[in-house]
Amino acid sequence: MLGLVSDYKKVILEIGFGNGENTAFLATKNPDALIVASEVYKSGIGSLLASIDKNSFRHIKIFDDDIRELLLNLSEPLFHEIYIICPDPWPKARHHKRRLVNKVFLENLHTVMYPGGTIYISTDWENYAEFIEEETPKLKDEFMAKKISNDGMPITRFQARAMREGREIYTYLLTTLKK
Ligand SMILES: C[S@@+](CC[C@H](N)C(=O)[O-])C[C@H]1O[C@@H](n2cnc3c(N)ncnc32)[C@H](O)[C@@H]1O
């Protein structure tokens, strides 16, 4: 049984965990945290379930629907850390509006984050990185954003593919400012 949120030292959300490589890393690194893992891709959910079984993790809760359905229903802070690694790139200009990370979504994340909490966003698309760099200054009262290295983090399936294809990984850390 997962118990109550208050039973945990902190709550960590990973959005779009893919095959769950980073989720397993977070779960191992944070045995006292509740890890909420969000993904809609069934085969990826199967991979994470296999990892949960293999590692006997008892502190991961999978949310298998569009994460916006959950976040829009929260009006209070719940999370201390959020991870979004390789959000779907939607590279064509006419599809940019479908990108998950935009001003409206980040405003929603601000509502659900504790002050001082961090949002880790990593993309393997230069144009998405530019988009993030355009969107984050619009929220300078909500977050302090900086570009960081992804050293020390696992390489996910999509990051590995990007590196094989010669693409750079762009990583940002947004620290939540007090409301
Ligand atoms: C490009 S993949 C990256 C997967 C993984 N993070 C990695 O780096 O290998 C993006 C993932 O985000 C998931 N995703 C996209 N929009 C989502 C949403 N609104 N809620 C939950 N998951 C979402 C997709 O199903 C997909 O598996």
Image: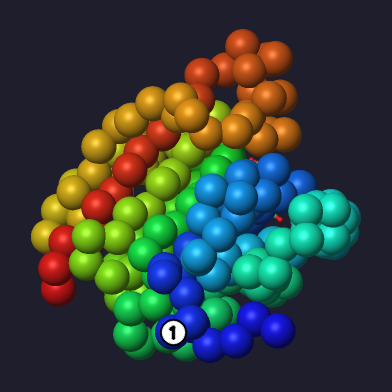
| Residue 146: percent from left, percent from top | 25, 37
Position above or below: 133 against 68: above
The quarter of the displayed image where residue 86 is located: top right
Which residue appears at 57% of the width and 17% of the height? 167
The kind of residue on which mark 1 rests is: Ser
Which residue appears at 60% of the width and 33% of the height? 154
Around disc 1, counting alpha carbons within 10 Å, would you say few (fewer than 14), some (14 to 19), or many (20 or more)? few
- Give the residue furthest to the top: 166
| Residue 20: percent from left, percent from top | 71, 49
How many labels, in total? 1
Position above or below: 175 against 7: above
- Residue 41 at least partly seen: no
Residue that carries the numbered disc 1 in the rendered image? 6
| Residue 55: percent from left, percent from top | 78, 53
Name the colouring of the figure: rainbow
The quarter of the displayed image where residue 46 is located: bottom right
**Disc 1 beta carbon < 8 A from ligand 1?**
no
Considering depth in this image, is 177 or 126 the residue closer to the camera?
177
Position above or below: 98 against 168: below
Considering depth in this image, is 131 or 78 the residue closer to the camera?
78
- Residue 101 at least partly seen: yes
The quadrant in which the C terminus is found is bottom left
Considering depth in this image, is 6 or 118 the residue closer to the camera?
6
The quadrant in which the N terminus is found is bottom right
| Residue 115: percent from left, percent from top | 22, 67
The quarter of the displayed image where residue 116 is located: bottom left
**Left or right position of 116 against 49:** left
Which residue appears at 71% of the width and 24% of the height? 161
Secondary structure beneath label 1: helix
